Amino acid sequence: MSEELARLLADLKEAEALAFVEKALEQGSDPLDLLASAKEGMAIVGERFADSDYFIPDLVFSGEILRRIVALLEPHLKKQGESNRLGKVIMGTVKGDIHDIGKDLVVFMLDVSGFEVTDLGIDVPVQRFVEAVRETGSKVVGLSGFLTLAFDSMKQTVDAIQEAGLRDDVKIMIGGGQIDERVRRFTGADAYGKDAIEAVALAQRWIGG
Amino acid sequence: MEKKWEEMSAEEKQEAQFQKLLAPKDPEGNDLKFQSREAEAAYKARINRLKDAIQLKRPPDRVPVALFPSMFPYMYAGMTVQEAMYDYEKCVAGYKKFVLDFEPDFPMGAAGPGPGRFYEILDYKLYSWPGHGVAPEHSYQCNEGEYMKAEEYDLLLSDPSFYFRNFYLPRVFGKLAPWNMLPPLTGILEMYGVAFNFIPFGLPPVQDAYKALFEAGAEALKWAMAVGGVDVELATLGFPNIFGGFSKAPFDVLGDTLRGTRGIMIDMYRQPDKLLKALEALTPIMIGLGLGAAQQTGKPFIFMPLHKGADGFLSDAQYKEFYWPTFKQVMLGLIEGGCIPLPAAEGGYNTRLKYLNELPKGKTLWMFDQTDMAAAKETVGDTICLLGNVPSSLLKLGTPDDIRDCVKKLIDTAGKGGGYVMGNGAFFDEAKPENVKAMVAFTREYGVYK
Ligand code: B12
């Protein structure tokens, strides 16, 4: 593990972080080690976001630096299964709504926090969520939505999971622009989270980590 | 003798604008004929009520109440969003029903749904709308993207209009793609060689683009006649549409539809100097946009939806460096020109309130979505007029009693001593009609200043 790389990434030093990775690879460092350091850096980014030292631009930019680091490492990494993930989470923007910025941030934060995320995308039909619960055996479902129409779509999604007999197997969290506690009660979801950090906290509470 | 416009102070210009609103004209330029004395009195009372609320000199007779919905009027009237977008008469009739049934002091006009066929003619790619990627009953939605590329700042800076015509517009309107072949107008200088500049206009794809443009223009005009007509009719019934135009904070201009959310945030790190230069270049353009619209419509209120400066989107330092300076300049420029900026602070604006005290007193009207209104009153209540804050979730899921509690609390805090307009916080699509009614009725009853 390289504390240096984790620190460079956490401080959003793009050029230095990339130069560090290139040099380390030349000198024969273990790419898996470098990847672990990068993840460590992302975890620090997440903490700073939770502490309100970092804001959305900082998250977005850290994701961009990580993307470039992974691109450098990829040719050197032998394909191997993702190790020790904390648990599975399904995320998607509900039917009728095509907004993805908020959902993508939640997916990103869950991912860097160690969860295995199945991202169903946007405008996700109710039944697609039900199928995904069956296919993946995930214990947590996150519904994102921006518009008032999403209130109904969220409720329909929760109802469909119930009708499929899967409601007791999963915890459902909702979030996005106009969502609040009142909407949670209306939809029958288990919890509402106001930002990506709360999404991570909920997932941790429900499936550990 | 009356002072010339250019010689007036911002204060005098604002007053003149209100006087103009109080003496409305019909489209032919004659004095507007009200349908009854009561309608005329109601119209004038509404303008004066708003004027008092905004100027912060004395409380109005009662708290004014505004309804600024998104697609609610059309859904309430029983049509799909698709119908409202394609059948202009139906759209306008639905909007009229909404105004007459709910009687807001300030309706927002029927322009929301927009002309569906117009978007089709030009193959608009920036949005999906009913029948084009969205179900008939749902509102149109933006397709987030980098419609301006990271390496195009110099192009934008050297000639914004050329950049828009040759790069941005060809990307967001499929039919205008051939515009990327057009020459810069600033190359048309002298007789020798002048004709070379016009060759692109002879090319079939460019000619097709112009044909589509003429058709789109005709469609836009047809739609505008319908939408403008109902505004005049409602004014004769006592309901003024105060909206004069639209502008944006320069950061949102780039961050919403040019570079996009991701793009602009990465630019803050990779090319902050270029970003700052572009924000400055957009500032006079955004002032001109508002002033020009106000001149055309004869109404001073310039609506400014605020996006990427909300709580959480930027740190305080980032807001102070990238968002606030040029946003403030745009507002000051509009105020200088006699306009009244009407920023809609979407999301939360709690951490930004302190900046608003840098604005001149009594010159702006701020719509708040999820901001703490008691704190806003406390921090900036002596500088700006507050509007809004009734939550979307309450309008859709609450009861009339919940609404009355909310309205009462808002009037007791934000409304204390004037300087407040009751209103919804977010532009809502769905709501229980009885809740919207309760909001207006209870404000009228409880919001009277003694
Ligand atoms: C930016 C923006 C736009 C841009 C979008 C494109 C772009 N390039 O950015 C533009 C200008 C095009 C736009 C257009 C419109 N908009 Co708009 N827009 C916004 C705005 C300001 C921010 C949205 C955003 O980017 N959020 C960023 C992400 C990060 O936030 P988020 O999605 O909420 O996600 C966070 C949390 O909520 C949470 N979260 C999200 N999902 C989940 C899931 C779980 C499980 C959990 C736990 C947490 C969680 O974590 C995320 C990160 O912390 C909001 C107001 C606001 N501040 O919310 C209005 C808003 C969404 N827009 C609105 C409207 C009305 C419109 C228009 C219809 C306006 C019009 N008449 O033209 C159009 C079309 C609809 C559309 N949005 O496409 C309304 C919607 C109200 C409604 N009807 O429900 C809003 C709420 C504004 C308002 N106050 O009225 N908009």
Image (cartoon, coloured by chain):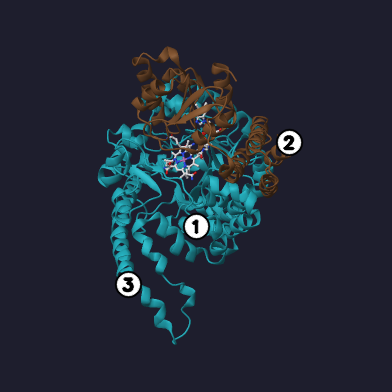
User: Callout 3: residue from which chain?
Assistant: B
Q: Is mark 3 within 8 Å of ligand 1?
A: no
User: Residue B258 placed where, x, y %?
Assistant: 50, 53
Colour applied to chain A: brown
Instruction: For marks 1 and 2, give the CA distance.
Output: 51 Å
Amino acid at dot 2: Glu
The reply, left or right, for residue A204 in relation to residue B123 is right
User: Callout 1: residue from which chain?
Assistant: B
Look at 74% across and 39% down and name the residue there: A4
Are there few (<14), some (14-19), or many (20+) residues within 10 Å of tag 3?
Answer: few
Amino acid at dot 3: Leu
Where is mark 1, residue-wise?
B289
User: Which numbered dot is residue B367?
Assistant: none
Colour applied to chain B: cyan
Q: Element type at marker 2? A: helix
The answer to the question of whether label 1 and label 2 lie on touching residues, with beta carbons closer than 8 A, is no
Q: Element type at marker 1? A: helix
Are there few (<14), some (14-19), or many (20+) residues within 10 Å of tag 1?
Answer: some
Q: Nearer the viewer's eye, disc 3 or disc 1?
A: 3
Where is mark 3, residue-wise?
B203
Where is mark 2, residue-wise?
A3
User: Callout 2: residue from which chain?
Assistant: A
